[in-house]
Amino acid sequence: CAAEANEGSVEVSIKPVVLDNQEVQRPKAEPSKIIERGDEKEAPSHGTYTVVLHPNKEFSALGIEVDETLDETLGPMITDLAMGSFIDAFNEQNPKQALALYDRVIAVGDLVSDGPAIAAKLREPLTGETIILTLRRPKQIYAHLFKPGALGMRLNYKCRSVGASVSELAPDGLVAKWNQEHPDEKVEIGDRILELNSMKHLGPELIEKLQNRSKMILTVLKF
């Protein structure tokens, strides 16, 4: 999408993070000891876990596709697990440790806190070496919002991002009202809005539809 497009909104203070044609200073990978590796025996319903992969010569790639366009220091989010791939075979053989869509890959070995670098590592051809992945599975909530009224949140997105992330919340507005009435299912800063009315959208399309819908069910990922 064009660099000058998709900026601002009447109801919601919305702007892109870094547009696709801009340079960004990426943080250096942090030492692996700063992250909690989680369980290596079973993936949780939500939270952190680790898998140890032992690729064989039958497969040339992991088969994991990710979105690294948002929240780069938190790790890329899984958007597809290719059928017939190594990771598909791993999931079938290890159902308790199976990777899932929308898990965030927060580390590959000692590579941490650099989303684009982690994404590039996941796309490398397999060499037969052991791969250790640390992942964070989100909790999903569903926020029901009804206009009139402003949403009262700022969203970060990119042209190719899956949904948008919440970067700021106003003390009033529809989201604040939802949070007050549903303290166990709050929409918070850092959450990812994945779907609107059960439909996934890229960032700019999601923003447009949020402005034009009067009844909204937001599928929100809480990492």
Image (spheres, helix red, strand yellow):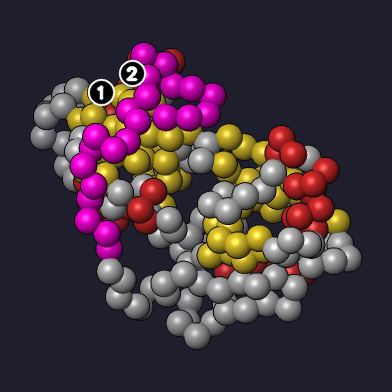
Q: SS of the residue at dot 1?
A: strand
Question: Seen in the image, is 214 located left or right of residue 115?
Answer: right
- The x, y position of residue 143, in whole percent, is 74, 46
Q: Is residue 140 above or below residue 8?
A: above
Q: Which residue is mark 1?
A: 52
Instruction: Give the residue type that dot 2 points to.
Output: Glu
Q: Residues within 10 Å of mark 1 (few under 14, many from 20)?
A: some
What's the residue at 37%, 24% (across, down)?
38
Magenta-highlighted residues: 26-48
How far is the residue under mark 1 from the one under mark 2?
8 Å
Magenta part, dominant SS: loop
- Residue 98 is marked as none
Residue 2 vertical placement versus 12 (above, below): below
101 part of magenta stretch? no
Q: Residue at x 70, y 39 (%)?
A: 185
Q: Which mark is residue 40?
A: 2
Q: Residue at x 52, y 65 (%)?
A: 157
Front position among marks 1 and 2: 2
